[in-house]
């Protein structure tokens, strides 16, 4: 009972992590809610393995990302990951220059592989390469190499989407 209360309290404090992961990986609100439920369930199932060797937020990111990446492998008929031509509803539809650039960046991120999306999300959250590597099971050096490649891809793809806007 105490473990359950601790889990609920920690999850409530850090639920924004789960919401961010759901927003990056899912386009539609219903799918985000389903993924949120699945991440919560997986986090609860593996809470006993959290030993406090890292921050709870780091552990929760890892569980959330692993769950998001594998979520639809179980159910192939449900596949609504962000498509390159679709923009998540979290973006305001105004026509300002900054909004157009943000939409282009989201479209470019939507074209990335699931693991690359995770890397970008964690990088944008200001996690260092060591922490990102720990969360994703990669070396810090591998994260640095992947991020350099991703940045080049995003620069190229963002420019394409921006020109199309």
Image: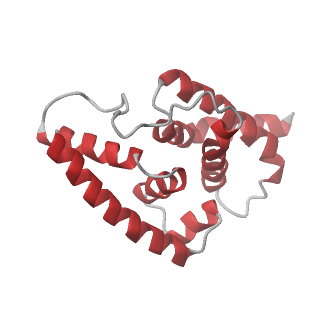
| Image spot of residue 65 (x, y percent) | 60, 48
Q: Measured along the vertical axis of the image, is residue 67 above or below residue 113?
A: above
Where residue 99 sits in the image (x, y, percent)? Answer: 20, 38
Front position in the image: 100 or 56 = 100
* Coloring basis for residues: secondary structure
Residue closest to the eye, 16 or 41: 41
Q: In the visual, does 107 lie left or right of 123?
A: left
Please name whichever residue, 20 or 147, is drawn nearer the observer in this view of the structure: 147
Q: Is residue 152 visible?
A: yes
Q: Residue furthest top?
A: 30
Residue at far bottom of view: 141
> In the rendered image of this protein, does residue 159 appear above or below residue 20?
below
In front here: 48 or 25?
A: 25
- Image quarter hosting the N terminus: top right
User: Which residue shows up at 81% across the image and 53% down it?
Assistant: 49
**Horizontal and vertical percent position of residue 105:** 29, 47
| Vertical comparison of 137 with 33: above or below | below
- Position of 41 with respect to 76 (left or right) is right
> What residue do we see at 77% from left, 34% from top?
5
Residue lying farthest to the front in this orientation = 77
Q: Determine the image quadrant of residue 35.
A: top right
Count of labels in the image: 0
Q: Position of residue 108 (x, y in %)?
A: 33, 48
Q: Quadrant of the rendered structure where residue 2 is? A: top right
Q: Quadrant of the C terminus?
A: top left
Residue name at image x 58 percent, y 67 percent:
133
């Amino acid at each position: 009972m105490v473990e359950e209360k601790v889990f609920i309290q920690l999850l409530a404090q850090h639920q924004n992590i789960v919401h961010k992961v759901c927003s990056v990986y899912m386009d539609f609100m219903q799918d985000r809610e389903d993924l949120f439920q699945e991440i919560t369930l997986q986090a609860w199932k593996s809470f006993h393995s959290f030993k406090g060797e890292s921050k709870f937020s780091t552990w929760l990111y890892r569980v959330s990302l692993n769950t998001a990446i594998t979520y639809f492998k179980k159910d192939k008929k449900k596949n609504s990951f962000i498509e390159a031509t679709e923009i998540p509803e979290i973006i305001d539809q105004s026509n300002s220059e900054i909004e157009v650039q943000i939409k282009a960046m989201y479209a470019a991120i939507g074209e990335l592989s699931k693991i690359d999306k995770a890397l970008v999300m964690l990088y944008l959250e200001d996690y260092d390469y060591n922490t990102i590597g720990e969360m994703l099971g990669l070396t810090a050096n591998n994260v640095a190499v992947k991020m350099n490649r991703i940045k080049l891809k995003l620069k190229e793809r963002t420019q394409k989407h921006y020109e199309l806007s």
